[in-house]
Structure formats: C-alpha cells, structure tokens
Amino acid sequence: MLRIPALSLLLLVFVPPTRKYILIAGVGLHVGIYVTMDAPFFTWMAMYAVFLDFDSLRRWVVLRNQDRHRQAPPLREAPLAGGS
C-alpha cells in the first residue's frame, strides 16, 4: 500500500518541473516525523541536497540580495543642531 506513493515520489523527483514540490514534501514529511516522534531523520533530510540545483539557488540568492539593496532608501545626514 505504501509502495506505490513512495515509488511515484521517487520517480517524480527526477522530473524537473515537479522536483521542487517533491523535495519540499519530502523534507516536510521527515521534519513532521521528527517533531511528532522524535525520530532522528537528519541524514535523510541531508540527502535531499543531492537534488538541489545549486546554480539556480545561487542566482536566486544573488538576485534577492540585489533587489534588497536596490530598494533600500539612501541614507541622509541629519542637519547639525544650532549650527549652519
């Protein structure tokens, strides 16, 4: 009964459009098991890193940081009190 969903998840992780959702579901599953049953699944969660696309992740982080710095208002100096 459990074999069909597990096998489909295993196969879907190799399909690029579904990979992100399958990895999120897998990590969520193992975190949920860890929280509710205190079972040490860290090694299983660490294995999900094999399927990450590090180039896309790096581009996303760089673009996010650029947008954050671009949206920050410029700093203005406060006028001196009592002076000209």
Image (spheres, rainbow, N blue to C red):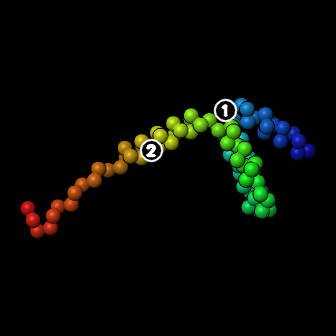
Is residue 3 found left or right of 44 in the rendered image?
A: right
* Residue at the (69%, 39%) spot, across then down: 50
Image vertical order of residue 33 relative to residue 60, above or below: below
Image vertical order of residue 10 relative to residue 77, above or below: above
Residue 16: x and y in percent read 67, 31
* Residue under pointer 1: 17
Residue 75: x and y in percent read 28, 53
Q: Amino acid at mark 1?
A: Pro
* Residue at the (24%, 54%) spot, across then down: 76
Task: Name the N-terminal-most of marks 2 and 1.
Answer: 1
Residue 12: x and y in percent read 75, 35
Q: Secondary structure at mark 2?
A: helix
Is residue 19 found left or right of 61 in the rendered image?
A: right
Q: Secondary structure at mark 1?
A: helix
Image vertical order of residue 25 relative to residue 84, above or below: above
Q: How many marks?
A: 2
Outermost residue toward the front in this view: 43
Mark 1 and mark 2 in contact (Cβ < 8 Å)? no
* Residue under pointer 2: 65
